[in-house]
Image: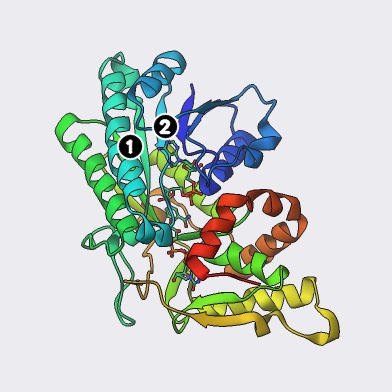
Amino acid sequence: MTLLVTGGAGFIGSNFVLDWLARHDEPVVNLDRLTYAGNLENLASVRDDPRHVFVHGDIGDRACVDRILAEHRPRAVLNFAAESHVDRSIHGPEDFIQTNVLGTFRLLEAVRAYWSALPGTARADFRFLHVSTDEVYGTLAPQQAPFTEAHAVEPNSPYSASKAASDHLVRAWHHTYGLPVLTTNCSNNYGPYHFPEKLIPLMIVNALAGKPLPVYGDGLQIRDWLYVVDHCRAIDRVLDAGVPGETYNVGGWNEKPNIEIVRTICALLDELRPLDGGRSYAAQITHVTDRPGHDRRYAIDARKIERELGWRPEETFETGIRKTVAWYLANGDWVERVQDGSYRDWVARQYGAQP
Ligand code: NAD
Ligand code: DAU
């Protein structure tokens, strides 16, 4: 019994691998291309664990995936690998098409060939779990009900369009070829090992560095926040009991406007790492030009996964954000090491020169 996890050196994938190995004996083979977002340091605690095998490679490299499948004979493939940052997709959509669309297609084809040749029970029990996003559903007006699994797919950014395309491919591989697939569409995650290009880690890191806290537009855009370990447990549950061909929405029941998130982070830092003279980190908040095509509101209706699989998030936003801020305060070395030259180039391109 082995799992093949793709993208397991990224934010959610590495949290999943660590959480899985802490709670199960089953080994994990981890295929990751190690883009700017992939970091083996996230997996340092399992470096010498024989249950974790890392393979440096691309989900779009058919020969590489075929070799891994033949050698390790996984009972499931969990696809976390993706280009994941909306702002980067606006500056350069091509990588998103390459990995999220073509890469998923090639992975599906390799997995289909492997699965087709499996003997009876192994074939029936096999699963391909695709990790997707609530962004495929588009944006919600203030009074609209949260996204259910039946909501229309209306992606608005190159990132979400590429994820929606991959979801469609996964669905079609089930309906046409019978591949036993599961899809999860999750809301915004936060927690340890989150790359500091995304809202929450960027705000923590910039605040501590005395830099501006760049809030896009009026800051009243709403996201539904979920602590990353809760997401990992939802994936575990779907893998265990999800019905092939089904989609499960995963969310935190935690809708919050961005400006409130930023103010909460500032208040926690004021408490845990106070500035001289009673000044607040909130003085660093700066409203900047809005993201083009910015989705105004996401909210997930997570009743299906609760009703059918018994999953509910354990962490509240208050407990999760406190843990997260504390993790960044305790892991300044990790932050420093991910802020290499390419990170600085990205920040300069997106936000202009910062002090
Ligand atoms: P991330 O950007 O932190 O990590 C992505 C990982 O995939 C990196 O380790 C990267 O090296 C790897 N990767 C990229 N291209 C690859 C390729 N061609 N072959 C192999 N590996 C490749 O992303 P994340 O935030 O951890 O997101 C993981 C998945 O969850 C993505 O599919 C994303 O769309 C989805 N998702 C993310 C969130 C969120 O809030 N972060 C929410 C819902 C869904
Ligand atoms: O909803 C799930 C999605 O959440 C995932 O599929 C994506 O992979 C993940 O990146 C995330 O997308 P968002 O665009 O919602 O996340 P981001 O952290 O980039 O932005 C969150 C909100 O904060 C969004 O409304 C934009 C805003 N923002 C972001 C940054 C980086 C700012 O106001 N300032 C910033 O500097």
**Which residue matches tag 1?**
103
Q: Name the residue nearer the viewer: 25 or 216.
A: 216
Residue 204 place in picture, x, y as percent: 65, 67
Packing grade of label 1 (10 A; few <14, some 14-19, many >=20) is many
Residue 153, labelled with which disc?
Answer: none
Q: Name the residue nearer the viewer: 196 or 18.
A: 196
Name the secondary structure under disc 2: loop
Q: Is mark 1 within 8 Å of ligand 1?
A: yes
From mark 1 to mark 2, how far is it between C-alphas? 8 Å
Residue 145 place in picture, x, y as percent: 31, 74
**Which residue matches tag 2?**
58
Instruction: Specify the quadrant that holds the C terminus.
Output: bottom right
Can residue 311 be seen from the camera position used here?
Answer: yes
- For the residues bearing labels 1 and 2, Cβ distance under 8 angstroms: yes
Q: Name the residue nearer the viewer: 67 or 333.
A: 333
Residue 174 place in picture, x, y as percent: 22, 36
